[in-house]
Amino acid sequence: MTESEAPPAKAPEGVSGAPALPQPVLEIASGYAFTGPALDLGALLWDGRCLPDVQIRIPLPMLNRHGLVAGATGTGKTKTLQLIAEQLSAQGVPVFLADVKGDVSGISAPGQENDKVRTRAGEVRQEWTPAGFPCEFYALGGMGHGIPVRATITSFGPVLLSKVLQLNQTQEQSLGLIFHYADQKGLELVDLKDLRAVVTFLTSDDGKSELKGIGGLSTATAGVILRSLTAFEAQGMSPFFGEPEFDTSELSRVAGDGRGTVSVLELPAVQDKPQLFSTFLMWLLADLFHDLPEVGDVDRPKLVFFFDEAHLLFNDASKAFLDAITQTVRLIRSKGVGVFFVTQTPKDVPGDVLAQLGNRVQHALRAFTPDDQKALKSTVKTFPNSPYDLEEVLTALGTGEAVVTVLSEKGAPTPVAATRLRAPESLMGPVDPAALDRAVGQSPLYGRYAEAVDRESAYEKLTAREAQAASSPAPAAPSAPAEPASSRGRGWKADDQDSSVVEQVVGSGVFKSLARSLGTQIGREITRSIFGTARRRR
């Protein structure tokens, strides 16, 4: 059962003069005897004892094979994330953490030694030293403590936006047609009012002829989408969409001392908007997937992305959405990115996604109800064969203990190991809000993203067209104009029936520039990928 090239582990003396370790323990120890760089999780638990001679670890190169951290509320999942993130940062790997409850910000400050920390460190043979790690703090739309993170509607795409708006499959497909229309007509969808303006135009008397040209989009469905957008805005969602759009390459930064930067997305201010923040996390991941180059297997990941409250992502998800998640997780590994889903039970994650998660840290599960017992049995079936009675172990684990199986240096599963986890060396709790605000204000990224920019886009162009139409006599039937100069040679594939798009939509004289600024989508057909998200030019 040895999974590394290290020689088989010798039988160490038992703890406190106990007999030498039994054969199953020796096999587990041999399975975690890695020769290369690895993260230290903790010490083996066996027959009610903690065995510090048997250290449980994850090989660093295997962190891009994805993972799952699961367990009931209060079992220590957040501290496990903190422990793994600290060690990744120390080895030069950038980390992304979503801070849903507001207690991860402490990773930026040294921990505080106390009796519990000393006891845990002694039990697992950890040389505990307080340490803070380089952090950047972000907040969706600037709501909360952090550098504002925004996305344009165009880059967010129709599939993700449909998830946020809670549209059904038919409405999702119709929204995709609206995005396609805006892409083809050169109407930039920067913020919510841009998309609302386009849908309003398509449902107006002037736009009905355009609506007929979009296959399969009915006036009734467009009206439903418009009402969903209006309700979404009324709930205060507008700040999340706009410019300057966040450049996800910021998440891959390394500090001056060589440690990986820990990017913490502060979410307490939007806890009541789970559909929004879970989908926004997926946008970050999809955008990274678009932009990162293929690197294959690497000595260390380029980034490890922790996806907290993962069940929110999959709840009520369409088939197209689930397929896109599965494909993203499958392919992003070759770009050096590891993704860890964090949730309560493995059944929260679809089977096609779960099958791709090579590293598992399973905290305690409850078995108080028939549903709990069913979830427990399902969880046990997802583990390799084990000498443990996992149903018993998983309900008896204490806080900060977990059942672990990871991929060895050869890519094969390691033996299942009940583990008492190490204590994080950073602060296990939130930092003072004033200190957090100071850190945000002093970041070199703050000036880049702090102030929202509202440039001319679809709303302004359609508003100007309406004003021009109101002050001018009705124009004659338009003839087919030449293709816009700045779109020639950029992949436009307009046919005869689309040749008058600019005049029909934005009006003569209003369309001032087909490429106003870096990153604009006008003047070219927008390339969309797995989630329908738009690929940006850096």
Image (spheres, helix red, strand yellow):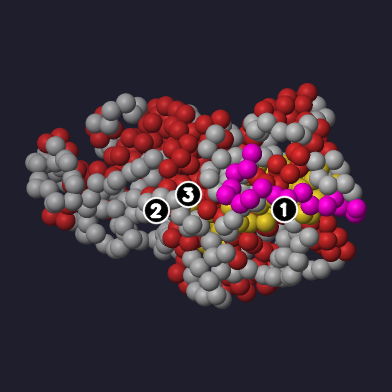
234, above or below 146, in the image: above
Residue wearing tag 2:
295
Residue 244 shown left or right of residue 390 in the figure: left
Assign a secondary structure to mark 2. loop
Query: Residue at (56%, 69%) from the top-left corner?
Result: 259
Query: Residue at (19%, 47%) from the top-left corner?
Result: 491
Q: Quadrant of residue 516?
A: bottom left
Residue 429 visible in rendering: no
Residue 241 shown left or right of residue 407 in the figure: left
Assign a secondary structure to mark 1. strand
Q: Amino acid at mark 3?
A: Leu
464, above or below 25, in the image: below
Q: Tell me the CA gap for discs 2 and 1.
A: 31 Å
Give residue 257's position: percent from left, percent from top: 55, 75
Q: Tell me the CA gap for discs 1 and 3.
A: 32 Å
Q: Are marks 2 and 1 in contact (CB under 8 Å)?
A: no
Among the two numbered marks 2 and 3 on one chain, the one whose residue lies closer to the N terminus: 3
Among the two numbered marks 2 and 1 on one chain, the one whose residue lies closer to the N terminus: 1
Q: Amino acid at mark 1?
A: Gln
Query: Residue at (61%, 51%) from the top-left corner?
Result: 6
Residue 483 shown left or right of residue 331 in the figure: left
Residue wearing tag 3:
285
Q: Nearer the viewer, residue 469 or 413?
A: 413
Give residue 152's position: percent from left, percent from top: 41, 53
Marker disc for residue 55? 1
- Stretch in magenta: 1-17
